[in-house]
Amino acid sequence: MKIQKGKSLIDQCDSRGFYGGKFGGNFVAETAIKPIQDLSKLFEKLRRDKKFLKLRDYYFKNYLGGETPFFKLENLTKHLGGAQIWCKDVSAIHGDAHKAYHATVNALICKASGKKYIVGDTGAGMFGKNLAMAAQKMGLKCKIFMGTKDIKRQSINAKFIKAAQAEIVPVSTGSATLVDAVSECMRYYVSNCDTTHLAVGSAIGANVFLKICAWSTSQISRELKQQLKREFGGKIPKLKLVNVIGGGSSAAGFWNEFIHYPKKQVELIGVEAKYAAPLSTNAKLAILHGAAQYCLTDKDGQIKDTHSISAGLDYPGVSPLHCFLKQTKRARFTTCSDSQALSAFKLVTKLESIRPSLEPSHALHEVIRI
């Protein structure tokens, strides 16, 4: 299986929504098939509609704040004495995270569909925070499903969600973390899909949901490509693009514009949390949240609990997009432990003015190791 030339990452699937013939698809309840088909048709229309693209770009510039910074980490580069280390600081966006892109796009799609209610899931709270903000901005009613464990450990973001007039629906089943929040959110959508738009918090789920997410976050690599050319004399230099992998939304957006470059020129490296690492541990193929993907499972084939110090990485599956990138060997994947992520955080914050969250600290560990 090879990456098809001339097609973006989300368009590498077949007509049934499968990447590489076996990842993804639409494993959904019968009552959700028609709403998902309708959403798929609407999204395919909107992503090619000049008026919608103009509206998206307007909100990206005037609501989210426009292009995010790209700069060299001078002190870290000097300290390590190796390759130049550069940072695409997406946290500088209004909303503090890449989640702002697909939260905003989902709110725009909800309005275009004529619906007034929007629901989403969240782990670390960043997608919930940004979806609540976007819903408030556009006059939508919003519910955020969040595990009770995550509500406690991400209390600041939980308070922000409520302050933005969204309702938090606590999820205490299972591990009471992201995986269960996604499940409960999808169950709610099946029962309320006539009036409600579902915004999935990462590049996971049935085909249209991961497409909407990755299409939105690809703004990161569109900007990065132009910034690289400005910094390096109009050309793309030899690169290692290192990104953390949880569900996979930020990496999909970070890598989208570069998947067709030769690996010798642009290497894609994904970093998973050590105990939530289906790509790095040769996990088995399983069905989770409407899609076939590599999942951490027990001996009976049931989904296993995971652990990470980072709530955003505490998920037993991964985007079918990254399963496909592993299958094609276009990206390689590795792991980082809690202690390694904390060590990377301490070193970077000691040397630089940036304050990365725990998620990208995993990727910074791999950068330092390299």
Image (cartoon, rainbow, N blue to C red):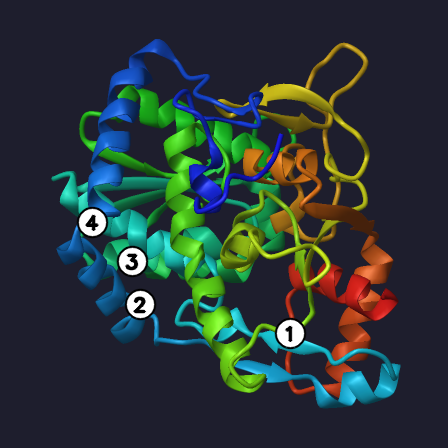
**Point 37% across, 43% down: residue:** 212
Are discs 1 and 4 less than 8 Å apart at CB?
no
Compare marks 3 and 4 and give the one earlier in the sequence. 3
Q: Nearer the viewer, mark 2 or mark 3?
A: 2
Out of 150 and 98, give the one closest to the viewer: 98
Are discs 2 and 1 less than 8 Å apart at CB?
no
Query: Mark 4 sits on what residue?
Result: 140
Q: Which mark is residue 237?
A: 1
Q: Is residue 56 visible?
A: yes
Compare marks 2 and 1 and give the one earlier in the sequence. 2
Q: Amino acid at mark 4?
A: Leu
Q: Amino acid at mark 3?
A: Ala
Q: CA distance from mark 2 to mark 3?
A: 11 Å
Q: Which mark is residue 60?
A: 2
Q: CA distance from mark 1 to mark 4?
A: 43 Å
Q: Amino acid at mark 2?
A: Phe
Q: Is residue 307 left or right of residue 182?
A: right
Q: Amino acid at mark 1?
A: Pro
